[in-house]
Image (cartoon, rainbow, N blue to C red):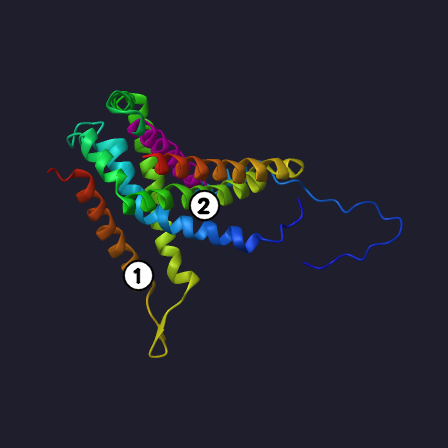
């Protein structure tokens, strides 16, 4: 972009205003906005977890009310959507790592999927560990 | 608002929260939000979960799980609102709302986990 010389009496340079819905024009932009909006699902999860902790603190009855509320169809639908957004976040976040930090080995750039792979490995192991802690009975 | 001078610090929180959210939140959300309410997996007992939450390591973990992702949200949501809505005159309000919310959530999670 070249800077236009400003003169003393020149009116403000005309700039077209970008539409508020600029991101609906193409799939790339839409994907970008969806990825950014995944943060809302992250915040939703934290709020739900805070309610869960408060219910745990308030005793068995309060916790039973909390789990009952989570079983309503609206809540399940909301959480399914939130879960999809979280998957979008995880996948885009992991795949970004090799771009942010290109790894070279023997003078050659390591393929992106090989750099992202350990992230997925860590994800699987961490998820299995948490599930084991939450679900084990004894 | 002009560029805040400590943008790097907020970016660090954003990025740390992004990692925590990517690795740990999906399984939590799947278990407690989807699989257990739908009855695919039986409900863990109240006593089991309480005992789990009362262990010191789990409390530290849960504090990290709540606080850092909130700051991740604050950063991303702030810029989504800046760019998406293009409401420059509201940028300071958006900033206060996002980081104020993240801070409140963090304090509340700390309070809850300390009283367990």
Q: Classify 10 Å Cα crowding around label 1: few (below 14), some (14-19), many (20 and above).
A: few
Residue B28: x %, y % from top left = 28, 39
Q: Residue at x 29, y 29 (%)?
A: A56
Viewer-side label of 2, 1: 2
Contact, mark 2 vs mark 1 (Cβ under 8 Å): no
Residue A40, given in percent of the width and then of the height, sits at 43, 36
The residue to which callout 2 is attached is: B72
Which residue ends up furthest to the bottom in the rendered image?
Answer: A106
The residue pinned by badge 1 equals A113
The residue lying at 61 percent from left, 35 percent from top is B93
Q: Which residues are magenta?
A: A34-56
Question: What secondary structure characterizes most of the magenta part?
Answer: helix
What chain does mark 2 sit on?
A: B
Instruction: Please check whether the numbered discs 2 and 1 fall on a single chain.
Output: no
Mark 1, chain letter?
A
Residue A51 location (% of width, % of height): 35, 29
Q: Tag 2's secondary structure?
A: helix
The reply, left or right, for residue B31 in relation to residue B84 is left
Q: Residue furthest right?
A: A9
Q: Pointer 2: residues within 10 angstroms few (<14), some, or many (20+)?
A: many
Magenta highlight on residue B17: no
Q: Give the quadrant of residue A49.
A: top left
């Amino acid at each position: 972009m070249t800077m236009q010389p400003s003169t003393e009496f020149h009116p403000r340079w005309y700039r077209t205003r970008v539409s508020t819905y600029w991101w609906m024009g193409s799939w790339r932009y839409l994907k970008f906005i969806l990825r950014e909006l995944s943060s809302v699902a992250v915040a939703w999860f934290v709020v739900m977890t805070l309610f869960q902790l408060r219910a745990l603190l308030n005793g068995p009855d309060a916790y039973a009310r909390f789990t009952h509320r989570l079983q309503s169809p609206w809540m399940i639908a909301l959480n399914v959507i939130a879960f999809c957004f979280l998957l979008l976040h995880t996948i885009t976040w992991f795949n970004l790592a090799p771009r942010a930090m290109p790894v070279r080995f023997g003078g050659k750039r390591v393929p992106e999927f090989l750099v992202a792979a350990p992230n997925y490995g860590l994800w699987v192991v961490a998820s299995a560990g948490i599930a084991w802690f939450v679900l084990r009975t004894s | 608002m002009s560029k805040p001078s400590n943008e790097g610090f907020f970016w660090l929180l954003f990025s740390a929260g992004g990692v925590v959210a990517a690795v740990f939140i999906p399984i939590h959300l799947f278990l407690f939000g989807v699989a257990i309410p739908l009855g695919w997996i039986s409900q863990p007992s109240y006593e089991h979960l309480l005992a789990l939450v009362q262990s010191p390591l789990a409390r530290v973990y849960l504090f990290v799980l709540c606080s850092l992702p909130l700051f991740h949200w604050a950063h991303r949501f702030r810029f989504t609102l800046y760019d998406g809505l293009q409401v420059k005159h509201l940028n300071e309000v958006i900033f206060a709302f996002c980081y104020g919310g993240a801070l409140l959530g963090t304090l509340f999670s700390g309070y809850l986990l300390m009283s367990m």
